[in-house]
Image (tube, coloured by chain):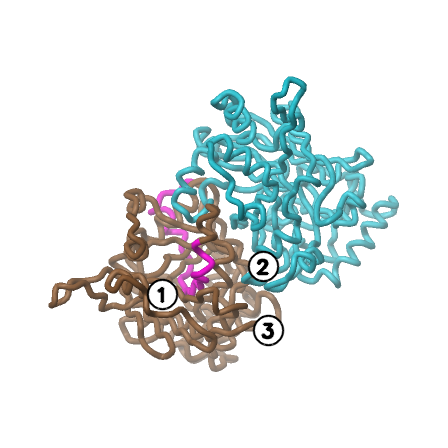
Chain colours: A brown, B cyan
Amino acid sequence: MKLATYKDGSRDGQLVVVSRDLSTAHYATGIAHKLQQALDDWNFISPQLHDLYVTLNQGKARHAFVFDPAQCMAPLPRAYQWADGSAYINHVELVRAARSSEVPDTFYTDPLMYQGGSDDFIGPCDDVVALSEDFGIDFEAEIAVVTGDVPMGVTPDQALHGVRLLMLVNDVSLRNLIPAELTKGFGFLQGKPATAFSPVAVTPDELGDAWAGGRVHLTLQSSWNGRKVGMCEAGPEMTFHFGQLIAHLGKTRNVRAGSIVGSGTVSNKGVTGANGKTEWPKGYSCIAEKRAIETILDGKPSTAYMQYGDTIRIEMKGKDGQSVFGAIDQKIAPAAA
Amino acid sequence: MKLATYKDGSRDGQLVVVSRDLSTAHYATGIAHKLQQALDDWNFISPQLHDLYVTLNQGKARHAFVFDPAQCMAPLPRAYQWADGSAYINHVELVRAARSSEVPDTFYTDPLMYQGGSDDFIGPCDDVVALSEDFGIDFEAEIAVVTGDVPMGVTPDQALHGVRLLMLVNDVSLRNLIPAELTKGFGFLQGKPATAFSPVAVTPDELGDAWAGGRVHLTLQSSWNGRKVGMCEAGPEMTFHFGQLIAHLGKTRNVRAGSIVGSGTVSNKGVTGANGKTEWPKGYSCIAEKRAIETILDGKPSTAYMQYGDTIRIEMKGKDGQSVFGAIDQKIAPAAA
């Protein structure tokens, strides 16, 4: 099942069911107006949404319309929780290697995760608004799950049963604000502005056998200003799977329905090329990583962060070549005058 | 105006208006069911709630009932944002002095703030449930504001206009989990379990001239196991006022209606006693501070953190001696078998 939230001028928008091929959609009116409402009462509401989904895919839904990602808010336009892991340890290794800092041993057994702001998400085609280019604007291409109610103290395997939906994320980061912020010791705040999500959220069954072991075994594509810069495999190198991430979050508290848990930047290890040098043929899912690679190879970064007018497109295709979640497709913009 | 949320088995409870003296209440049914709904449309809904408040205070509300704090959820049982400052620098100074670490100069000009979980708040009389006493269970008595919509990049003075409501907070902390968590660099996650709030949230006008300069000029009382351990003045020593805290949060993103912004542990400086030694006659608003004081005086802490069965009561009285927010009154408990 694929779900999206259409803009209607309200804070939470209108829940729509989207066809598997993302060509058509249908308002879920009469079943649930808002996605959070469906998540709050999933066992009752989701079968009804699924019935509509089946009818829509058969081309028999009476009030179907052409699906337009530009009309989408984030599937959850605001949420009660957004906690983002850093589950691809290669990302941490790269960034640390660039500043000659070791990765602590515990990072391989204890997930790194930060609590993010969730009151003001942006849609897949909304501008990334920043008050200054000097903030060091970067994208971060990630995967996230939306959970049901998961009780405190669950095991990673139990936690996996709490996965209701999956989405793509652009976890926008303001790199030049982050070092000073992290030095203060309380985590990210100003360094992480509004986060963007893919047009649709999908149930795990939509991924078929690409959803295995709590990981998504597909390729995450990132295109910066129209140039493909990342073709990263999201499956094998995810050090902690989504069940482990949810269980980590739930160690001391309940994780309630509608919580969003992210994977962190999808990242693949470098390989040794024919000339004996390390290469990163899969590219990168954030500019910070590109700059880390440049620092490792050349002693300093040469790629600048994003400027106003830059675009970023993040997408993932299934084994059939079709877009699973629709594309995040954003432009960097100054605040409106 | 004073507002509370009554338990009704649902996730968001039922909005009630509470009389100024906290003796009676009235369902806001017909105006708004949920507090978030009122915050989303404050200019339209709050005057109607205020009319009911006036009628209730006059003893003329037809379906008024006796107000029972034990029936309360948090005023916002779940929220889209919970960001907690550390606005009483004395708290930071004490904790750092105990571990012989200097407070960086920037801490006096740039607020310290962490993003907290907001999907699963607990009511003022709900148990604080912890899976282990070894986590180092501590209370933290604080004040928080609930905001309206505050746009990105506002000044502290502008941000103050965004304050809709005030509450008390028990920002429960698991002290023994925090050092390792903060060392990882991404802020608090497991160290901060479910947060509790006072029975009622009040509009700033309820504080009269005790609400001045973005600070609450009243005494925050904390009683641990029935013994008064803190009588801390919340006004003069709040280094950053609430407008500054909201503006800090809003530097790179919009702060949307229903966001909760906390003050951090209310803390007063020590004074030099007759014997030339430093004393802390106002007591403490968290045990970590008591232990810091012990470490400074005796070289090591002697007060243990909370055990199952311990109680904590947090309250603030107005200049008329009446409780402003009602009391947070909780017991520490193991998870249900």
Residue carrying label 1: A286
x%, y% of residue A53?
44, 71
Q: Quadrant of residue B289?
A: top right
The furthest residue to the front: B276
- The mark lying in front, picked from 3 and 2, is 2
Mark 2 falls on what kind of element?
Answer: loop
Residue carrying label 3: A8
Label 1 vs 3, first from the N-terminus: 3
Three-letter amino acid code of the residue under disc 3: Asp
In this view, B324 is above or below B275: below
Q: CA distance from mark 1 to mark 2?
A: 24 Å
The disc at residue B250 is 2
Q: Viewer-proximal residue, B185 or A135?
A: A135
In this view, A138 is above or below B313: below
* Left or right: A305 in relation to B204: left
Find out whether residue B47 is within the magenta segment: no
Residue at 66% from the left image edge and 36% from the top image edge:
B70
x%, y% of residue A128?
49, 70
Q: Chain of mark 2?
A: B
* Left or right: B332 in relation to A168: right
Q: Within 10 angstroms of label 1, few (less than 14), some, or many (20 or more) residues?
A: many
Residue at 30% from the left image edge and 64% from the top image edge:
A208
Which range of residues does the magenta coloring cover?
A153-179
